[in-house]
Amino acid sequence: MKKQYFGGLSLFLVMLIFLSYTPIYGQSNRVVTLGNDLNQEQQKQMLRIFDVMDQEVKRLVVTNDEEREYLQGVATEAQIGTRAISSAYVEGLAAGEGIQVETYNITWVTKEMFQNALLTAGVKDAKIIAAAPFNVSGTAALTGILKAFEEMTGKPIDEEQKQIANEEIVKTGRLGEEIGRDKASRLVQEVKQEIIDKNVQNPEEIKRIIIDIAGRLDINLNTDQINDLSGLMERINRLNLKTEEMRQQLESIGRQLGEIAEQNKEVKSILDRILEFIKRIFDSILGMVKRSEKAFLWL
């Protein structure tokens, strides 16, 4: 009787746990979005990159019209294009794991730019892969990522957040062309973090923060760049994003950007030493040639 009792109780507890379990991310924890203009072989290529070739995963299609809706007036026509090629994979992660991004054949938008913009859109704790079958700028990839995240969570993202996130991608990319992509990503991340931490609303105070952080990062900005970045930060600030969640995610991105900066310094240091070594060799050879010329003249 006791065995039957405990057996029945165990079964009841297992059923109770199973019935009370609610997945964190809606019906599916993984969603794929494919560019509408990919041919069948290219679609298969994307699924292989996402490692979901033979798996049951929710698949959606993204059109150029959808991409254009958020990029029109922000990106150039060349960046928007006329076809939907960029594809995305989104997988929900446990709370606190942050946003992890991988890219394939994305040439203009960096992983860190995606991370920063996704935070602005309200995305958190997700593994993201943005990919294309050949080199593309990546500006349109954000549309597919956000569409997949909405499907995964079962919750729509505010339209204004989508617009501003896309604007952030493009403006950071343009700034990156002028000061370097890693520097631009780090500047945007640090400025955004300080403004959110301190709940700064005043436009002049935002500009002061931009100038201070740029100086700390050894970045020279002109007036147009400061005004452009300030306007973007004012719009981000008006979204009233959840401060604590943003702070945690931004700190995670900041650590990654800091590691990249240190790696770049290390590489630069190695290159400097190599160049200095080569210079000494050339100086030595030149000295030998000059001495030989003098000796020849005395003959």
Image (cartoon, rainbow, N blue to C red):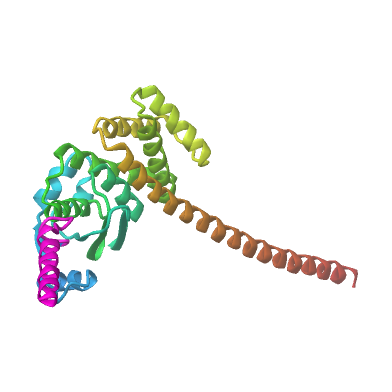
Q: What is the span of residues highlighted in magenta in the rendered image?
A: 1-30
Q: Is residue 181 above or below residue 21?
A: above
Magenta segment, prevailing SS (helix, strand or loop): helix
Quarter assignment of residue 201 = top left
| Residue 134 placement (x, y as % from top left) | 24, 66
Taking depth in this image into account, of 229 and 118 the one nearest to the observer is 118
In the image, 40 versus 90, the foreground residue is 90
In the image, residue 185 sits, relative to residue 294, either above or below, namely: above
Q: Residue at 77% across / 69% down in the picture?
A: 289
Q: Can residue 223 be seen by looking at this rendering?
A: yes
Name the quarter where the C terminus is drawn.
bottom right
Tell me how many marks there are.
Answer: 0
- In the displayed image of the protein, which residue is found farthest to the front? 1
Percent x, y of residue 270: 60, 62
Query: What x and y, as percent, mark residue 61?
Result: 9, 59
Q: Residue at x 55, y 55 (%)?
A: 265
Quadrant in which the N terminus appears:
bottom left
At x 48%, y 55%, the residue is: 259
Which residue, as the protein is rendered here, is positioned at the far right? 298
Q: Is residue 25 magenta?
A: yes
Picture layout, residue 263 above or below residue 181: below
Q: Does 51 sit left or right of 12 as displayed?
A: right
Q: Quadrant of residue 39?
A: bottom left
Q: Position of residue 78 (x, y in %)?
A: 22, 50
Q: Is residue 33 visible?
A: no
Tell whether position 10 is magenta: yes
* Nearer-the-camera pick, 294 or 255: 255
Left or right: residue 292 versus residue 32 is right
